[in-house]
Amino acid sequence: MTSLARFDHTIAGFFLPPEDMAVYSACFRTANMISFGLYAINAILSPQASHLIANKNAAGLQSLVARATQLRFWPSLAAVAVLAVAGSQILHVFGPDFARGQLTLVILGVSQLVIAAAGPV
């Protein structure tokens, strides 16, 4: 992860006490697990995209991007639903005080959903 990808932690560290920063970090890492699926789908479909681009098959590429977006969006939506319903129990694994971060977890999960809906880049 690049230093810019963790810039939110640096900024949040200026405004949040250490206890809240720990909750935010646990929420961030938990919600970021959704991105594993996004990267996996991109990795699987990238060779096909390269082939379609090399053959100048715009229609095939458009179809692949649409399929990739569907493959990214629906599982991400399911994951966000799980975070919304069971987020406090998931965060409780980190400790009883972490359960209070459920709203933060859902917001971070929704941000992953927006990334999924945007499709592969």
Image (tube, grey):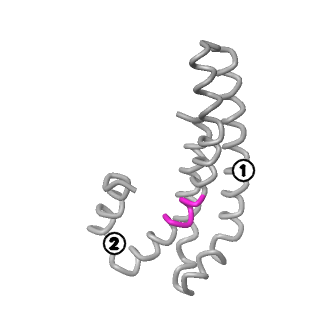
Q: Is residue 99 above or below residue 111?
A: below
Left or right for 17, reference 49: left
Please say if 18 is above or below 33: below
Residue at the image position 53 percent from the left and 57 percent from the top = 108
In this rendering, would 30 be left or right of 68? left
Q: Secondary structure at mark 2?
A: loop
Residue 50: x percent and y percent?
58, 26
Identity of the residue drawn at 53% across and 72% down: 101
Q: Check the image and report above or below for 2 versus 46.
A: below
Q: Are marks 1 and 2 in contact (CB under 8 Å)?
A: no
Magenta stretch prevailing secondary structure: helix
Q: Which residue is mark 1?
A: 75
Q: Quadrant of residue 56?
A: top right
What is the span of residues highlighted in magenta in the rendered image?
A: 28-33
Please name which of the two marks, 1 or 2, marks the residue nearer to the observer: 1
> Is 65 within the magenta?
no
Circle number at residue 16? 2
Nearer the N terminus, badge 1 or badge 2? Answer: 2
What is the CA distance from the residue labelled 1 to the residue labelled 2?
32 Å
Q: Amino acid at mark 2?
A: Leu
Q: Quadrant of residue 41?
A: top right
